[in-house]
Image (cartoon, coloured by chain):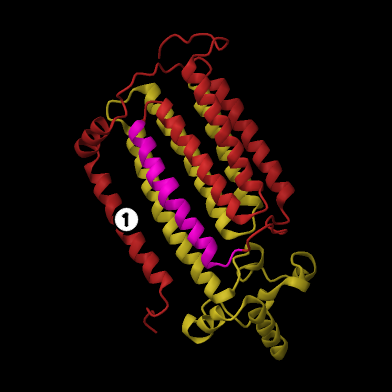
Amino acid sequence: MHVVYPAVVSALLFSIGVYGVLARRNTILVLMSVELMLNAVNLNLVAFDVWLRDRLHSGQVLTLFVIVIAAAEVGLGLAIILALYRNRQTVDLDRLRDLAEPTGTDGGTARDPAQDPAQDPVRGPLQGPATAGSSDARTDPGQAVSESAARSGETS
Amino acid sequence: MTEAPSYLSPTGQEIVFLLLGAVAVGSALLVVTTKQLVHAALWLVVCFGALAGGYLVLTAEFVAWVQVLIYVGAIVALLLFGLMLTRAPIGRTADLDSRNRPAAAVVAVATAVVLVTVVIDGFRTAYAPLEPGGGSAKELGSSIFRNWVLPFEALSVLLLAALIGAIVLSRTDIRGRD
């Protein structure tokens, strides 16, 4: 087996993962792309372990470790995404702009005001799930959107 | 390590690996381009399965089975649960890609070109003869429990911490100290 073949396959998988992380909007799809990148690394580790015939089997053992870390990462990532969804009713990365730079022209260029429910600065990121988040989570997303839009209308 | 045979006469193992690699890359492309959320998770299964086949061809059989068990079995099921709990729309969704998609494509193509040229340039003459048995459960197990015990135990503690953290994050009745 030429070492080039697995190396090229893993390079292609890695760049596909890069594309997914940068281009996708849904947070869970971004997590899937991260998994693709981790798998590219795993393929490289296995191929080079077979090539170098490491006596400690470091390549394959590290592959197992990477798989375990990926499992932990997916578990934590999904828990964070679920907490986010409980508080915001969206997992859309483009709408989570609380930490963005507050520039004057931001509303015109960087976001689409017509379909942007998370635009209101009132609902901070630390809003407790027991106060409004858990009640919002059980209403349907459309109602929550109109509710938050009304709330931002009151304060402005 | 050993003298490389010509690229023009591929062995059966190389052909099988290249076919599996093509399946993996193609389904990975579908994962990042499909318009349906659930289909992305299912194409991810195909990609991971093809990669597990690739590990088998590379004589890493234990890693292949772990890949099938954990990636195909657990992680994809977890991602599907995540899609379900965030009320992902069934069917085609129009706005799955963000506005920086052209920039992302440029970056990804540039990454692919750089990595593939470097890899081909660097490992053109490298050849790994495949001998079965190097990746069996016995070999890997003795290697882990002889040389890698401390990272293994640290990793188990990490996994425990991650699971407890996930439970604490996803339950709403556990509050922080106010």
Q: What range of the chain is rendered magenta? A: B61-88
Tell me which residue sits at (32%, 29%) in the image. B135
- Colour in which chain B is shown? red
- Give the x, y percent position of residue A156: 73, 88
Tell me which residue sits at (70%, 91%) in the image. A154
Does residue A134 belong to the magenta stretch? no
Judge left or right: residue B45 versus residue A154.
left
- Please indicate, yes or no, whether residue A1 appears anywhere in the rendered image: no
> Chain letter of disc 1?
B
Q: Residues within 10 Å of mark 1 (few under 14, many from 20)?
A: some
Judge left or right: residue A107 versus residue B68.
right
Judge left or right: residue A156 versus residue A28.
right
- Colour in which chain A is shown? yellow
Q: Quadrant of residue A62?
A: top left
Q: Quadrant of the C terminus of chain B?
A: bottom left
- Give the x, y percent position of residue A150: 70, 86
Which residue is label 1 attached to? B158
Identify the amino acid type marked 1.
Leu
| Vertical position of residue B5 compared to residue B162: above or below | above
- Please indicate, yes or no, whether residue B36 appears anywhere in the rendered image: yes
| Vertical position of residue A68 compared to residue A122: above or below | above
Tell me which residue sits at (69%, 55%) in the image. B97
Does residue B64 belong to the magenta stretch? yes
Tell me which residue sits at (29%, 24%) in the image. B133
- The residue lying furthest to the front in this view is B91
Q: Label the magenta part by its dominant secondary structure.
A: helix
How many numbered callouts?
Answer: 1
Q: Nearer the viewer, residue A105 or A52?
A: A52
Q: Quadrant of the N terminus of chain B?
A: top left
- Give the x, y percent position of residue B56: 40, 29
Q: Secondary structure at mark 1?
A: helix
| Vertical position of residue A135 compared to residue A72: above or below | below
